[in-house]
Amino acid sequence: MPSPSKHSKLSPSKSNIWLNCSYSSLFMDGETNEKSEVAEFGTQCHELGAALISKALHVTNYDEEFKTIEEVKEGLSMYSAEMQDIADGYADYAVNAYEFEKKRSKQEPLVVIEQELDLSDIEEDGVGTLDLGIVSDRDGGTLTIIDLKTGRLPVYAKDPKTGKFNSQLGMYALYFYKTFKDLYQIKNIRLVIYQPVINNTNECEITLEELLNFEEKCLKPMVQRIKNGFHNPRCGDHCKYCPGRMLCRYRMLNDLWTLPFAEKEVNKLSEEEINAILPHLDGIISYAEDLKEYALKKALAGKKWDGFKLVYSKVTRKIIDEEQVIKICKEEGIDPFVSQKLAGITELTKRLGKEKFKELLGGYVALQEGSLVLVKNDDSREEVNIEEEKNNA
């Protein structure tokens, strides 16, 4: 597999963002991106799937040290039964796709797995990694791109709203074509999304002419704008995937600029004004949640925000020795059960009385702390010392 240290600012995987908003390229520096467990699971799942496909199709990568499937599994820190199921399904799908092309071709199809693509004409040292590519002579030359998705948000080879093909797959197809166009005749492009976790496997077919048109009218112009420093912000559905969504000033102001109550001296919003505000609320709430999450992550890392502190979101009480509580309640002549189960703390307090509950059962009740949240300093909850929490973890 390609070196994980390599990072492309204008990568195919983020193309739906920067092709829609050139301003987003300012955040594509690798620093704003945070490696999540979900993303790491996907990376390791790809590695296992690639190993299974290579074994099934007898494909050898001479640039890497050979590893058995068991050795690959041993090197995966997040290996699980779920990962195995996904990888097995992906391998089966890939092998079937290869066999489909092979049966309809005169010559043996070309197959590449985890192929690193040269994107240097987009940016210096730019690379992209294609999950699986097949070239056959079917129908005058067919290039197939298969992309494994392990997330739970649906991804489409062709956008059902706009009718446009997936730009990530389009870029993979374009640079795969450029790599082998002198060796193979290609007329047709097949783009496939394999997303088994939500049973969302879908595909679309385009012509080579459509692919090259995408390069000339969409890809090249936007790359040139970005290289020239023309960073024109544009908000849309792509914002929720942008690594700079928490810090983007334009996104923060986008909906607020359009609100109808600016510079109006009124004590009460009219129904017309409320109606005009409603379409913007989802965007405002989404941005606020992203920003709050960013501020919390910084605080958990030790950042002190002026006027704010870390506290536990809630503290609940839980009985830690049910047998002792039942015994004591019976000795006091009260029924400790509700529907044959031990009653909750509130109910037992009601039956025994607050002081007696504390005296008799207080030693068998422990406080359970919730997750950390960021609140204003005038909140009554006790502040958490994050450094002490780290040391006690």
Image (cartoon, rainbow, N blue to C red):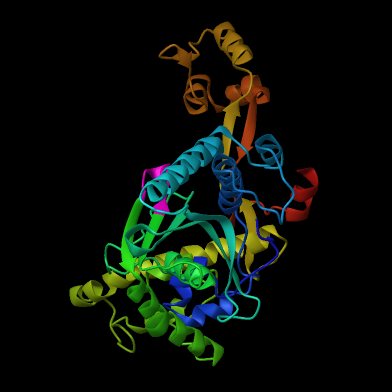
Q: Percent from the top left, x then y, of residue 97?
A: 41, 47
Q: Percent from the top left, x then y, of residue 128?
A: 57, 67
Q: Percent from the top left, x then y, of residue 168?
A: 45, 66
Residue toward you, 380 or 53 = 53
Is residue 262 visible in this depiction of the protein? yes
Asked if residue 56 lies in the magenta stretch, the reply is no
Instruction: Work out whether 303 lies above or below 231.
Output: above
Q: Which residue extends farthest right? A: 391
Instruction: Locate residue 14 relative to residue 6 in the image: left or right.
Output: left
Instruction: Work out whether 97 lies above or below 322.
Output: below
Asked if residue 194 lies in the magenta stretch, the reply is yes
Residue 320 quadrant: top right
Residue toward you, 220 or 245 = 220
Q: Residue shown at 30%/83% (left/top)?
A: 261
Instruction: Locate residue 107 relative to residue 326 in the image: left or right.
Output: left
Q: Percent from the top left, x then y, of residue 10?
A: 55, 75
What quarter of the picture does the N terminus occupy?
bottom right
Residue 276 quadrant: bottom left
Q: Which residue extends farthest left? A: 272
Instruction: Work out whether 70 lies above or below 207.
Output: above
Q: Which residues are magenta?
A: 193-201
Q: Residue shown at 29%/79% (left/top)?
A: 267
Instruction: Locate residue 146 relative to residue 385 in the image: left or right.
Output: left
Is residue 378 visible in this depiction of the protein? no
Q: Residue shown at 60%/66% (left/top)?
A: 33
